[in-house]
Image (spheres, rainbow, N blue to C red):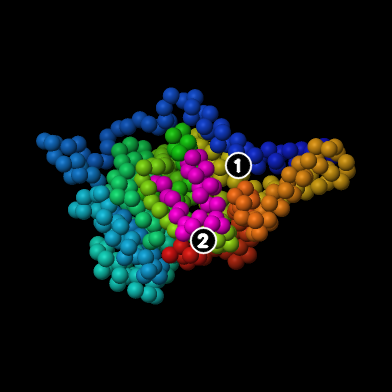
Amino acid sequence: MLALEVLFWLSLGLILWTQLGYGLALAALARALPSAAGARRARPLRSPDRGGADQSSSLPFLSLIVAAHDEQSVIAAKVENALALDYPRERLEVIVACDGCGDETAVRAGEAGADLVLELPRGGKIRAQDAAVGRARGEIVAFSDANALWEAAAARALVGAFDDPLVGYACGQVRFVGDDGAGNQEGVYWRYELALRALESRLGSITAGNGAIYATTRDAYIFVDPIMGHDLSLPFNMVKRGLRAVYVPDARASEKMVPSLGGEFARKRRMMSHTWPILLHGGILSPRGYRPGYALMIFSHRLLRYITPVLHLFALGANVALVGIDAGPLYSITLALQVALLLAAALAGVLRARPLLIARYYVLTTASSAAGLWDWLRHGTPPSWDAAEGTR
């Protein structure tokens, strides 16, 4: 019985730590420290102004790269959005890298005013980005999705992070916008995730970014395996190279939300099929190059989060066994709570109450991690990608 109890409480404790305790610990630590770790500044990338010159002339040259596969419906709006940024036009380059497009993406990108349109064979998003970086002229290379629209001030805010020469990677804030908000609780999860990201950035470096709005210095750009996306690969690799990966909440972008939980499950399942190779073969779990605090962040926010489905199975199995051997009334209560979570998720398909929808979102997104692992183990992960349902 002791072994079952240890398994149950350890599994439950790790779930609670990664989902709640980790965030509380970060918040407490951030309050205890007088200022952000790594807030030191040295020689900026931009040159100092002289003779009262317009500050725009001192901004670094920025190459904004959009990798696109069959995005004819949104690419013109994306290019127009990029050209409307509050960033001097003579210091901004817009590159559209067409990844094996079979539609009019390239034509429409050129007509909308993109500075460079690359028509590439299908090789996946990462290889399209690599090709664009090879042609880019900017000191800073920034990346965005074809369906992500940046606020006017986003480019300046993102570039500003590189005033600190120890910063090698910076990501902004993406907001998900739904037609009516019904049926998808991504916003609840994402606000919590962004709060964790802000705390990680303040205390050192973030453990993951997002594909809608991020940038690196050209010199710090890393060529990674094409099945291992930038969102997870770049931040920890920057840290291993002695640089920081930071979050810039003032650099804002928006994307259309996946309209259904089924679509959200499919999107996260696909993302997790790219995550598991990074976790198991990409070096993220190797502590070499990490400071102890960052190693704990990776363990708490990445490893434990991704293995949460296994922890839930351990907790449920041990709980059922403990109730079966009549280990005490406490275990009947904990089993009832676990079953209640599953029932709430199931009822969300009938009753559209917010707590039930959140429970369903949690169950489905947790399950997507296991589904992504299954997909990767069964047939591997292709480097190519397709747009998520209803996001264009």
Answer with the quarter of the image where residue 49 lies.
top left
Element marked by disc 2: loop
Q: Amino acid at mark 1?
A: Gln
Residue 141 in the image: state x and y as whole percent: 32, 52
User: Which residue is located at x 50 percent, y 60 percent?
Assistant: 258
- Residue 16: within the magenta? no
Element marked by disc 1: helix
Q: Is residue 274 visible?
A: no
Q: How many marks?
A: 2
> Which residue is outermost to the left?
51
Q: Are marks 1 and 2 in contact (CB under 8 Å)?
A: no
Q: Which residues are magenta?
A: 172-197
- Residue 195: within the magenta? yes
Residue 196 in the image: state x and y as whole percent: 50, 40
Q: Dot 1 corresponds to which residue?
A: 19
Tell me the number on the disc at residue 115.
Answer: none
**Which quadrant: the N terminus?**
top right
> Which residue is outermost to the bottom?
102
User: Which residue is located at x 33 percent, y 37 percent?
Assistant: 164
For residue 104, above or below residue 142: below
Q: Is residue 141 visible?
A: yes
Q: CA distance from mark 1 to mark 2?
A: 25 Å
Q: Closer to the observer: label 1 or label 2?
A: 2
Q: Dot 2 corresponds to which residue?
A: 259
Q: Amino acid at mark 2?
A: Pro
User: Which residue is located at x 56 percent, y 32 percent?
Assistant: 25
User: Which residue is located at x 58 percent, y 36 percent?
Assistant: 22
